[in-house]
Image: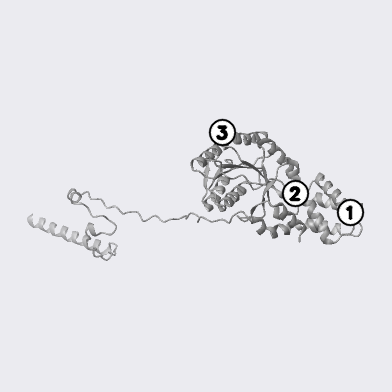
């Protein structure tokens, strides 16, 4: 019996050994990654970018390792403060640009006046030329009547004599004696307040920025009020103009009450002792009664804090007589004190200067003669007429 048990144990052992051999023979082979020696330990105090742990923290096993943030880089640099040229003499520098567009009127009139025979047909052409240039019907008739009388008296008509006659008549219609002073000087502790108004697309915000630039060039401290709260882009545009010349800008959230923003701008202007506060307003159609009433409200609210010294109506010179009705409504609502004619360099219809002054009884004080930042100039009647009639 014992021999049988021993024999059985031997058989089981041989079978187990065979099974192990088969498993080792057929199991999948895996490649072990090469061992990488561990880096030498670095003391916490010497680890780059980590502060050394205090003794108390080491003892407690709670030492923290904080990587300080990288130094903040200035991603957007503020624009450099520019030093604009003074406003004096700007129209002289821009005269050639004005002459290129307005001299068409003068050449046409001189050609007609130089004809050997000035009959009714020629005078009708002269009248048509002036009306086409947006001089207006009433001023045109007055000019033609005066020219006919003087030509008859003169007799001979050399080119220089005709140019002198035309210059004299145009200058009389433009109004060389009108007060074109721009009231931007502070009164005592109160800054001058300039309100910019007009219809959509005439260039009000650009005019406000260019005017601020011109005043800074004249040595004045200026503050801009972004009371066009209907368009965030208008406030952003005004902000850019202010940053370029170092003028502060007061603005409110989009959709805020424009009168409130205008009031805050004037209040800050008084507190900061600035010389001039320029308030830009939203463009509005003259036919929208609600918006026109709002414009009147802006002016009334400002006047609770300070007097409004100038209300400048911005008109696009290219609209011609279409802008006359707009101008009349604005004048009725806010008592316009001066006209700004923009885009005067791009049209041969400079006669709008004559007609708008005649209709409103308000002088043209500023003209836009280009798209450059320094292309807004005080209006000079003599230079304007000289540009029309040429040398």
Q: Residue furthest left?
A: 2
CA distance for labels 1 and 3: 58 Å
Q: Residue at x 90, y 55 (%)?
A: 118
Q: Residues within 10 Å of mark 2 (few under 14, many from 20)?
A: many
Residue 196 pos. (x, y %): 62, 43
141 with respect to 277 (left or right): right
The answer to which quarter of the image holds residue 260 is: top right
Mark 2, residue position: 174
Quadrant housing the C terminus: bottom right
Circle 3 — which element? loop
Q: Residue at x 69, y 58 (%)?
A: 95
Mark closer to the chain start, 2 or 3: 2
Mark 3, residue position: 304
Quick check: marks 1 and 3 in contact, CB under 8 Å?
no
Residue 295 pos. (x, y %): 63, 36
CA distance for labels 2 and 1: 24 Å
Q: Give the number of the mark in front: 2 or 3.
A: 2
Who is closer to the viewer here, 254 or 63? 254
Mark closer to the chain start, 2 or 1: 1
Q: Residue at x 57, y 46 (%)?
A: 233
Mark closer to the chain start, 1 or 3: 1
Color theme of the render: one colour
351 with respect to 61 (left or right): right
Circle 2 — which element? helix
CA distance for labels 2 and 3: 36 Å
């Amino acid at each position: 019996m014992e021999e049988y048990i021993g024999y059985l144990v031997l058989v089981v052992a041989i079978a187990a050994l065979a099974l192990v051999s088969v498993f080792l023979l057929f199991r999948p082979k895996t490649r072990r990654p090469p061992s990488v020696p561990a880096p030498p330990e670095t003391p916490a105090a010497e680890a780059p970018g980590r502060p050394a742990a205090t003794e108390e923290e080491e003892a407690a096993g709670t030492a923290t390792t904080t990587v300080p943030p990288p130094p903040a880089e200035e991603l957007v640099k503020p624009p450099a403060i520019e030093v604009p040229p003074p406003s004096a003499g700007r129209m002289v520098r821009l005269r050639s640009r004005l002459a290129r567009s307005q001299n068409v009127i003068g050449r046409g009139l001189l050609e007609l006046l130089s004809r050997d025979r000035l009959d009714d047909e020629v005078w009708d052409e002269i009248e048509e030329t002036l009306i086409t240039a947006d001089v207006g019907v009433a001023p045109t008739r007055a000019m033609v009547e005066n020219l006919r009388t003087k030509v008859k008296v003169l007799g001979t008509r050399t080119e220089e004599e005709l140019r002198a006659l035309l210059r004299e008549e145009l200058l009389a219609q433009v109004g060389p004696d009108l007060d074109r002073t721009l009231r931007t000087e502070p009164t005592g502790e109160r800054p001058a307040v300039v309100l910019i108004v007009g219809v959509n697309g005439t260039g009000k915000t650009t005019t406000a920025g260019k005017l601020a630039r011109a005043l800074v060039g004249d040595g004045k401290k200026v503050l801009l009020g972004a009371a066009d709260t209907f368009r965030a882009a208008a406030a952003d545009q005004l902000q850019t103009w202010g940053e370029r010349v170092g003028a502060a800008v007061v603005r409110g959230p989009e959709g805020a009450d424009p009168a409130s923003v205008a009031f805050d701008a004037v209040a800050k202007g008084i507190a900061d002792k600035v010389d001039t506060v320029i308030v830009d307003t939203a463009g509005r159609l003259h036919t929208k009664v609600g918006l026109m009433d709002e414009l009147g409200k802006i002016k009334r609210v400002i006047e609770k804090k300070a007097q409004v010294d100038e209300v400048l109506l911005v008109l696009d010179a290219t609209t011609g007589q279409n802008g006359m009705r707009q101008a009349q409504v604005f004048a009725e609502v806010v008592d316009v004190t001066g006209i700004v004619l923009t885009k005067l360099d791009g049209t041969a219809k400079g006669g709008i200067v004559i007609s708008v002054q005649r209709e409103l009884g308000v002088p043209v004080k500023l003209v836009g003669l280009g798209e450059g930042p320094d292309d807004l100039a005080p209006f000079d009647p003599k230079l304007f007429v000289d540009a029309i009639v040429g040398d």
